[in-house]
Image (spheres, helix red, strand yellow):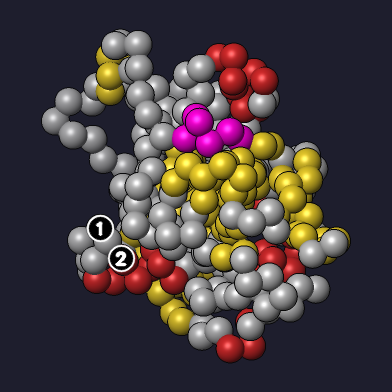
Amino acid sequence: MLKTNIDNLVQLSVTGEIAHPAYARTPYRISADGEPVVVAGSAGVTYNVRVGDSATRWAADHVEPAVSIKNPKGNGFDGANGGLNVLACIGNEARVVSGKAEGEKGVVTGKHGGAERVMVDFPADVMEKMLPGDNILVRGWGVGMELLDYSGVKVFSLSPQLLEAWGIEEADGRLKVPVTHRVPAAVMGSGLGQASVHRGDYDITLFDEKTASEYDLNHLRLGDIVAIVDADHSYGRIYRTGAVSIGIIIHGDSFVAGHGPGVTSLMTAKGGEIEPVINPDANIASILKLRTDL
């Protein structure tokens, strides 16, 4: 087990309501090829999409797996919704506290920037009992985490639960981190330049067919943990040769230029302390045993 400061981390309650899907006055989105499309979007209870499923095959745009929550007592980044989006960490326990599914438990699996929503995975039979407006309590635990033997590695939005189960190994002063894919920073899009990576995500663009094929990016799954090569997330998301950042796929692909499967940051290092190791099972659905049908 990696040495951390988890005994000093504060656990805080944060809540959100299941967000209702919404459209602007026009339902059309303009694709990267200039075509207008109308498809399903994000938010709500997504009955047939969960972590472990494809991030790229859906007739949808930015589809969010399972349940999407937002705190209405805030305006995007601000207030209570800002607290939810910062303090909820990937792998945290979530519990339904209102509605017909009250008492059921789930797991935080992502944070969607721009929309400022948090995604929570629940079993399919539980989702059948849920509806927009139901309240979800998250036991926020992980903000402020440090890896005590690796001062060059910064950690974000990572719960102790996920860190313990992940299977990271230490060798020769480096962390061998299981990931499903390596992603070149050159194809990263929306979300670049944000001043903080403690919430939200940024997108892998899949419009360059040669790159997508070379790195097998068309087979990304929701919940996959990936390594973004030549990307530094220390104080925002930037291109930096030699840096490696690790994140989790939190929403699906997009038709819109600059967008694609979203990645919430988990850790970063610019001095070679992180060595990505390809493992097809490095998906949160497998790591935390969220599904038995994969």
Task: Verify whether residue 234 appears in magenta.
Answer: no
Indicate the position of residue 50 as horizontal and vertical percent values: 58, 43
Residue 105: x %, y % from top left: 58, 66
Q: Nearer the viewer, residue 142 or 241?
A: 241
Q: Which mark is residue 76?
A: 1
The front one of 21 and 261 is: 261
Disc 2 target residue: 81
Mark 2 neighbour class, 10 Å CA radius: few under 14, some 14 to 19, many 20 or more: many
User: Where 165 sits versus 128, above or below?
Assistant: below
**Which stretch did the figure color magenta?**
183-188
Q: Position of residue 206 (x, y in %)?
A: 51, 23
Q: For this view, does 162 lie left or right of residue 99?
A: right
Label 1 element class: loop
Residue 217: image quadrant is: top right
Query: Can see residue 189?
Result: yes
Residue depicted at x 74% and y 69%: 164
